[in-house]
């Protein structure tokens, strides 16, 4: 029982280390803890794409102390495969004399899956797989989606008033939510690989689709079947990569036009996601308006949803800033639902 608890604690530490990797895209986040005689001798994590993998970083810190150690890693150590740019980790663990490897999950990359573990076993190392697998899968949901189904992990994000409006009747859709919610949303933008909207959102709001200093800016993806994107739109400012998916032959300044098929002015969303995956996009945040949201939901392409609910009542209001709102709103669960209630201010 104590041994199991100790192993769990060490794998949770490896997962915490993995979360330190902020620039690993399009690689997964991976953490590694080396333990010998009950003591941690070294730790490592994959910090950035092109840099050392977690196992390599830990082995470098451990030096000769790695011999006879157990490695706790959040993902199966990689083996040599086509297109690999860094030295494989499984042979490095063998060469360092590591005795055992405990991996949270297999690598979903078809070029690796099971191959790294096979290298270890053929060399006499003991292996275990599955400890904290749910947490490991959640950590790299984007990478798993890209590898297993050739599609990014899709997060749908929307902001709604309490009465279900995404914008006021006057068409002013900005600032439905509070400054705190908007800061949280910008933080989310900095953690995804791409942010996607339809051209209707650009025409209505002319957004920059940036993280506004909350972190790195994602790739900006615009769905524009007919080529209606204005040449002076803020998303074409050249400050972040911008990809315009279109069925037209139009060229866009400071952006790359990507041709995909369209039917009745609707782009093939599966083709869009497939192309994003091919280009290394692991997570895409769909921020477009109701039309784009409805299309993604209808096609069953949404993996996760973030809904910011404002206590405002927008029906009949032309300005969301002056719309009636609940005063000191309260919330309680009613079965699977949430009830918001309070006096109208």
Image (cartoon, rainbow, N blue to C red):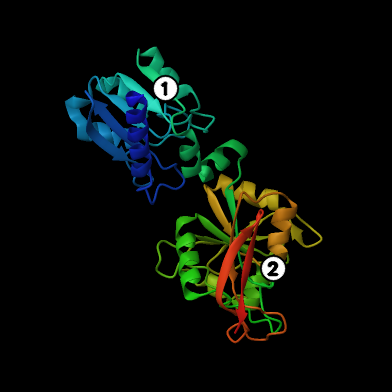
Q: Looking at the image, how many numbered discs can be counted on the residues? A: 2
**In the image, is residue 278 above or below residue 95?**
below
Q: Quadrant of residue 63?
A: top left
Q: Secondary structure at mark 2?
A: loop
| Mark 2 or mark 1: whose residue is earlier in sequence | 1
Q: Is any part of residue 229 visible from this angle?
A: no
Q: Secondary structure at mark 1?
A: strand
**In the image, is residue 8 above or below residue 21?**
above
The crowding category of the residue bearing disc 1, from other C-alpha atoms within 10 Å (few below 14, some 14 to 19, many at least 20), is some
Instruction: Measuring from the top left, give residue 9's x and y in whole percent.
Output: 34, 35
Instruction: Measuring from the top left, give residue 312's x and y in whole percent.
Output: 61, 77
Q: On the rendered image, what quadrant is the C terminus found in?
A: bottom right
**Nearer the observer, 345 or 249:** 345
Q: Is residue 205 left or right of residue 315?
A: left
Q: Quadrant of residue 174?
A: bottom right
Instruction: Measuring from the top left, give residue 24's x and y in whole percent.
Output: 40, 47
**Nearer the observer, 171 or 269:** 171
**Nearer the observer, 173 or 263:** 173
**In the image, is residue 39 above or below residue 235?**
above
Q: Tell me the residue at 52%/33% (across/down).
A: 108
Say which residue label 1 marks: 128
Give the CA separation, mark 2 to mark 1. Answer: 53 Å
Say which residue label 2 marks: 227
């Amino acid at each position: 029982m104590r041994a199991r608890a100790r192993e769990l604690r060490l794998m949770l530490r490896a997962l915490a280390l993995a979360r330190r990797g902020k620039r690993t895209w399009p690689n997964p986040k991976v953490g590694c803890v080396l333990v010998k005689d009950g003591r941690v001798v070294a730790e490592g994590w994959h910090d950035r794409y092109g840099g050392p993998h977690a196992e390599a970083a830990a082995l470098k810190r451990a030096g000769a102390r790695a011999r006879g150690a157990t490695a706790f890693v959040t993902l199966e150590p990689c083996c040599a495969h086509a297109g690999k740019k860094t030295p494989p980790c499984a042979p490095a663990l063998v060469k360092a004399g590591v005795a055992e490897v405990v991996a949270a999950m297999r690598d979903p990359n078809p070029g690796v899956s099971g191959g790294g573990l096979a290298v270890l076993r053929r060399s006499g190392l003991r292996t275990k797989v599955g400890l904290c697998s749910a947490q490991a899968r959640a950590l790299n949901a984007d990478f798993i989606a890209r590898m297993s189904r050739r599609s990014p992990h899709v997060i749908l994000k929307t902001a709604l008033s309490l009465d279900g409006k995404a914008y006021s009747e006057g068409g002013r859709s900005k600032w439905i939510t509070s400054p705190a919610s908007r800061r949280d949303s910008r933080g989310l933008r900095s953690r995804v690989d791409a942010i996607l909207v339809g051209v209707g959102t650009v025409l209505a709001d002319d957004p920059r689709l940036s993280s506004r200093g909350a972190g790195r800016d994602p790739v900006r993806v615009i769905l524009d079947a007919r080529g209606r994107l204005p040449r002076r739109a803020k998303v074409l400012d050249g400050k972040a990569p911008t990809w315009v998916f279109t069925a037209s032959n139009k060229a866009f300044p400071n952006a790359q036009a990507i041709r995909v098929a369209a039917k009745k002015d609707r782009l093939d969303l599966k083709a869009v996601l497939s192309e994003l995956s091919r280009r290394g996009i692991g997570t895409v945040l769909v921020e477009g308006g109701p039309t784009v949201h409805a299309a993604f939901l209808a096609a069953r392409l949404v993996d996760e949803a973030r809904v910011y609910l404002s206590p405002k009542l927008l029906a009949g209001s032309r300005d969301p800033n002056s719309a009636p709102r609940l005063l000191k709103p309260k919330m309680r669960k009613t079965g699977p639902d949430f009830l918001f209630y309070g006096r109208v201010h």
